[in-house]
């Protein structure tokens, strides 16, 4: 009985340490001390399971992304979808962020592939699908594939749960592209 109580206390302390580390990591992240936040998230990670572990793993990737270590961030984000207990929301966010990182290093076709993966995840929130569609549109636009970009931007209005702000941004991009196509007077 005493052993069981000692184990329970130890588990409780370890959970408290992990929680404390995550709180410190969040504070460091908010202070834009990304390398320090990354270290704290990594320290807390072994003590976590389920969605808490997946979310913490996501933040490791996010810290690296904020440091512009895009390739390393991609590796960390990829771990999220393999984690037990990861929800469609956190998985879709990690995949979306992979697309953002690839876009940052000008790997537009690969970014589009990742954004398309977001659209295929079951039970993914509509706002995330809209963000992915916008990312696809931007990649096409950068590549001067304006018709493909227009199709993606127009699609955003039809996505259930697409935020008003995302729809408005898509309309701005549509207007911009359409104005490019108009003959100069």
Image (cartoon, rainbow, N blue to C red):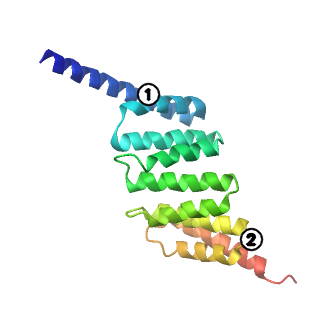
How far across and down, in percent of the image, does residue 119 sit?
48, 66
Give the residue drawn at x 67%, y 70%: 173
Instruction: Identify residue for label 1.
Output: 21
49 left or right of 97 in image: left
Taking 10 as reference, is 62 above or below it?
A: below
Q: In this rendered view, identify the residue nearer to me: 145 or 176.
A: 145
Looking at the image, residue 106 sits to the left or right of residue 162; the answer is: right
Asked if 133 appears above or below 41 in the picture, the reply is below
The answer, for residue 177, to whether it is visible in the render is: yes
The residue that appears at 62% across and 45% down in the rendered structure is 71
Task: Tell me how far mark 2 sits from mark 1, CA to CA.
Answer: 45 Å
Q: Which numbered disc, 2 or 1, marks the residue that appears first in the sequence?
A: 1
Q: Residue furthest left?
A: 1
Residue 123's quadrant in the figure?
Answer: bottom left
Disc on res. 105:
none
The answer, for residue 165, to whether it is visible in the render is: no
Residue 94 shown left or right of residue 112 in the figure:
left
Q: Residue at the top extreme?
A: 2
* Quarter of the view holding residue 56: top left
**Around disc 2, counting alpha carbons within 10 Å, would you say few (fewer than 14), some (14 to 19), or many (20 or more)?**
few
* Residue 84 position within the rendered picture, expressed as x and y whole percent measured from the top left: 35, 46
Q: Is residue 182 above or below residue 130?
A: below
Quarter placement of the C terminus: bottom right
Residue 160, horizontal then vertical, whole percent: 43, 71
Extreme-right residue of the structure: 185
Give the residue number, with chain letter if any, for mark 2: 144
Left/right placement of residue 143 relative to residue 14 reads right
x and y, in percent, of residue 3 in the image = 17, 17
């Amino acid at each position: 009985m005493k052993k069981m109580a000692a184990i329970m206390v130890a588990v409780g302390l370890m959970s408290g340490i992990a929680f404390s580390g995550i709180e410190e990591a969040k504070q460091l992240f908010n202070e834009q001390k990304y390398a320090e936040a990354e270290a704290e998230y990594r320290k807390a990670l072994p003590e976590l399971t389920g969605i808490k572990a997946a979310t913490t793993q996501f933040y490791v990737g996010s810290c690296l992304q904020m440091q512009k270590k895009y390739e390393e961030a991609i590796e960390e984000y990829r771990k999220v979808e393999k984690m037990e207990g990861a929800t469609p929301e956190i998985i879709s966010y990690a995949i979306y962020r992979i697309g953002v990182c690839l876009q940052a290093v000008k790997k537009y076709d690969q970014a589009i592939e990742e954004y398309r993966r977001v659209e295929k995840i079951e039970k993914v929130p509509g706002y995330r699908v809209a963000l992915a569609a916008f990312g696809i549109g931007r990649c096409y636009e950068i590549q001067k594939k304006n018709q493909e970009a227009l199709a993606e931007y127009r699609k955003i209005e039809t996505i259930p749960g697409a935020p008003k702000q995302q729809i408005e941004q898509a309309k701005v991009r549509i207007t911009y592209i359409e104005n490019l196509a108009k003959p100069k007077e």
